[in-house]
Every structure is written in C-alpha cells, then in structure tokens.
Amino acid sequence: MALAESIGGKMAMVFPGQGSQFVGMGRALYDVSQAARRVFDQADEVLNFPLAALCFRGSAEELEDTLNAQPAILTVSTATLEAIRERAQALGGKFTPAIVAGHSLGEFTALVATGVLDFSSALRLVRDRGRFMKEAGQEYPGGMAAVIGLDDETLVQVCAEAGREGVIVVANANSPGQTVISGELGALARAMELAKERGAKRVARLGISIASHSPLMARASSQLGEIVAKLPLQTPRVPIVANATGRAITTVEEIRQELAHHVERPVNWTRSVKEMVNAGATTFVEVGPGQVLSGLIKRISRDVTTLGVGDLGLGLPANDRPAT
C-alpha cells in the first residue's frame, strides 16, 4: 500500500520557502538517513561549499543571508523528502502525493519532487536566484512586513496610499487575515503606519533585507528567466500548484511561464491551498524545515489534516525549529 493512502485520503505535499531556515536544520535526518546524507554531500560537492556544516552549526546571520538561505532550504527539504522515500521503501510502501505546491522558494523543491528538475540543477538555479535577489536588494533597498487582521481591500488601499513614498505592493496572501507587503523602505514604513491606523491587529517587519515578490525584483526575475529558458525541464509526474495563479499546472510550458516572473509576482498561498483542497486533498504533508505552512493551511481549511515528517509513523525525527 502507498504511504499516501495509509495516512488517510488524498495527499498533498508542500514545501516551505525562505524564512523557515534555522541553525541545526536537517542534522537529525543526516544522522539517521543514508538518503539524506547523500543529498547533503551532493550539495556540498555541487556548490563547492560546506553547506551541510552551515545548516548544522553555522552562524544564524550567515545562514539567513539570502545567498545561503535559498540553497540551504532547498537542500534540507530535498533531504527530508529522500529520507521519507527511503524509509517508506524499506517498509514496503511508497510516498507519492497526488498534488504538490511550494511557497515561493519552495516551488523549486516542488519541481525536484515531481521530476521537473534534478536536484543538482535546482540547487545551482536557486543559488543564482539568491545571488540575483541579493544584488537587486543592494541596488534597490527594500523590505517586507507581515500584516495580520486587516482585510484585503483595505490593505490594497493602504499600499496605494503609501505608494506615494515609493514602490509598495501586496506580496504574499498567506492565509485569511495574514498578508505580507513588500517594497521600498520609505513606502514600507508608511504602509506599516497606515495599516496600524486602519485597524490591523499586528504589523511586524520581517527579517528579510530584500523586497521579494515586488517590482523591485524585476531585474533578478529577468536574469533568472534567462537561465530557466535554457534549462531542460521534464513534465511533472503530478500537478504543481503555481504560486502566482494558485492553479494547478501540468506542462513544461506552463512551468516556464510560472518561473519567468517568479520573484517579482505575488504568492497567492490561500488560493493555492484551496486549489489543492478542491482537487481532493485531505492530508497535507509539510516537507522541509519547520511547520510554518502547516499553520497557514489550518487557517485556510479546518477540514484537512496537516502532518510533518515526524508524524508519518516512519521513525524519522521531526525537523521542527527548536524552541527559543
């Protein structure tokens, strides 16, 4: 029996994005899984850089650098997936989702999981993605902030008003009542003030020094698009829900279109989860560091089950962020 069936209902697999990283991530899996170790060893070889050591015991500041965080999260998420597949196979089962999605950076892990890209190619791609985004952030300084408890229409109005100070947009629709805005520093500060004045329950600046998923990333998006256009992509084995549209895509051409403007277009995670639920998904397995997506998914649909790697009954350790 497939593991996807044994955990109950139709399974969706989701992969986290930047911000989910923490020092120590992946170490427990590295210690118990040969498959996970192979992924980390391959990452070190491909990047010619001790990425595993950075994940396990590096400084938080170095790990949070977007240049490092992106390949690190991709590697930990892929290692987690391979550890699950290894253990499931040893138990005579399979781990095959019906549909997948990744939040922002996590979409690249979804491409690996569905066979669109091999891990080495994806690793090089996200290393370039991180470099392009960092360079764009140095040229056009910006940031991001989470806004909780404000309706979408009001927040759009807030961004329009704050836009007199510079570029500011809604970047991530994470769940009902939780949205991320992104843009130039002056406009971001003004939007945060306005959001509080208009009744937001909480407004918090994120620990990200770039304005991801905003027009400030146009150059990075163009650079990434040039690389993607030349990469050989394979047809996904299962549908992938696209960040920008929140719709399932199944062809190479659709994937190229999705990635062409990936870092400058917003992420509609709420619609993405609803798309997976409408496709029949009843169980969501979060594959990667932390459990950020599981919390968002439960706010979007209370009728689904969310699981982490430690909940699968395979004897693998949970890869949760340690308590601070």
Image: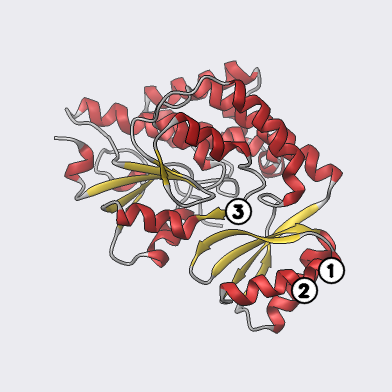
**Circle nearer the N terminus (3, 1):** 1
Relative side of 204 to 38, left or right: right
Taking 212 as reference, is 261 above or below it?
Answer: above
Depth order, front residue of 22/164: 164
Residue 275 image position (x, y, % from top left): 37, 54
Q: Which mark is residue 164?
A: 1
Q: Quadrant of residue 148?
A: bottom right
Q: Quadrant of residue 110?
A: top left
The residue at which mark 2 appears reads as 161
Residue at horizontal 50%, vertical 40%? 107
Q: Residue 266 carries which label?
A: 3
Q: Quadrant of residue 316?
A: top left
The amino acid type, in three-letter code, at marker 2 is Glu
Gap between marks 1 and 2, in whole Å? Answer: 6 Å
Q: Residue 103 carries which label?
A: none
Residue at horizontal 28%, vertical 38%? 315
Please indicate, yes or no, whether residue 217 appears anywhere in the rendered image.
yes
The residue tagged with tag 3: helix, strand or loop? Answer: loop
Gap between marks 3 and 1, in whole Å? Answer: 20 Å
Residue at horizontal 72%, vertical 69%? 159
**Circle nearer the N terminus (2, 3):** 2
Residue 239 image position (x, y, % from top left): 36, 39
Residue 79 image position (x, y, % from top left): 44, 30
Relative side of 116 to 266, left or right: left
Neighbours of disc 3 within 10 Å: few (<14), some (14-19), many (20+): many
